[in-house]
């Protein structure tokens, strides 16, 4: 945007377009484009207009449905899985709607909607340390009894 405004200001000071292009590190054709856009639309015409980009493969009207599936989990959707993966979610979307997408498209959808698929954290990782110690002691006693019983033959 700065270069575009500079080109307009330099032109107003009667600088040649070739010299403007050299000073701004661009081509004379770009300087001509900047000036034409300024003449057509003023400062608004100089604003950078980004292309909208590729349309997502998963239609936005399906977002609430997909987010519900993710919240409910695969078991609630009738699948024998513990958790969603991008591949499993893409396959389920294809089964339900006929829309086939790849794992990467499903990953993009999840990132756009702030969803992070995860593996379940098992309870023993968050368990009470005293109960873990007690369970380890019970297991060691049980294993000791088994070893003793196998030696008594």
Image (cartoon, rainbow, N blue to C red):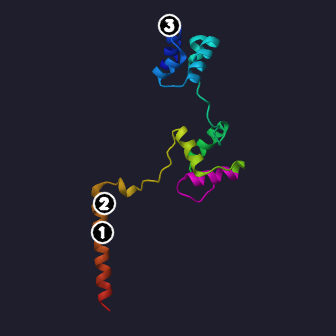
Q: Earlier in the sequence, mark 2 or mark 3?
A: 3
Answer whether residue 93 is magenta in the image.
yes
Q: Is residue 125 left or right of residue 104?
A: left
Near-viewer residue (127 or 152): 127
Q: CA distance from mark 1 to mark 2?
A: 10 Å
Which element is circle 1 on?
A: helix
From this view, report whether residue 138 is shown above or below residue 153. above
Task: Please state which of the two labelled residues, at mark 1 or mark 3, is closer to the viewer.
Answer: 3
Q: Position of residue 84 (x, y in %)?
A: 55, 52
Q: Residues within 10 Å of mark 2 (few under 14, many from 20)?
A: some
Q: Position of residue 115 (x, y in %)?
A: 52, 42
Q: Which mark is residue 132?
A: 2
Task: Write down the residue under mark 3.
Answer: 13
Task: Please state which of the two labelled residues, at mark 2 or mark 3, is closer to the viewer.
Answer: 3
The quadrant of the rendering that contains the C terminus is bottom left
Which element is circle 2 on?
A: helix
Which element is circle 3 on?
A: loop
Q: Is residue 43 visible?
A: yes
Q: Is residue 48 visible?
A: no
Q: Position of residue 34 (x, y in %)?
A: 58, 18
Q: Residue at x 50, y 10 (%)?
A: 9
Task: Write down the residue under mark 1.
Answer: 138
Answer whether residue 29 is magenta in the image.
no
Q: Quadrant of residue 50?
A: top right
Q: Position of residue 78 (x, y in %)?
A: 63, 55
Span shown in magenta:
77-95
Q: Which mark is residue 40?
A: none
Q: Residues within 10 Å of mark 3 (few under 14, many from 20)?
A: few
Q: Residue at x 65, y 13 (%)?
A: 40
């Amino acid at each position: 945007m700065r270069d575009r405004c500079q080109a307009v200001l330099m032109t107003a000071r009667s600088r040649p377009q070739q010299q403007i292009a050299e000073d701004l590190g661009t081509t004379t054709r770009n300087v001509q484009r900047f000036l034409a856009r300024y003449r057509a639309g003023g400062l608004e015409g100089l604003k950078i207009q980004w292309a909208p980009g590729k349309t997502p493969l998963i239609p936005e009207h399906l977002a609430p449905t997909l987010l519900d599936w993710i919240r409910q989990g695969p078991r609630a959707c009738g699948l024998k899985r513990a958790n969603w993966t991008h591949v499993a979610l893409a396959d389920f979307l294809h089964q339900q709607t006929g829309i086939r997408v790849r794992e990467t498209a499903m990953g993009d959808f999840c990132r756009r909607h702030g969803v992070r698929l995860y593996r379940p954290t098992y309870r023993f990782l968050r368990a009470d340390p005293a109960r873990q110690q007690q369970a380890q002691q019970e297991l060691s006693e049980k294993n000791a009894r088994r070893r003793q019983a196998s030696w008594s033959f």
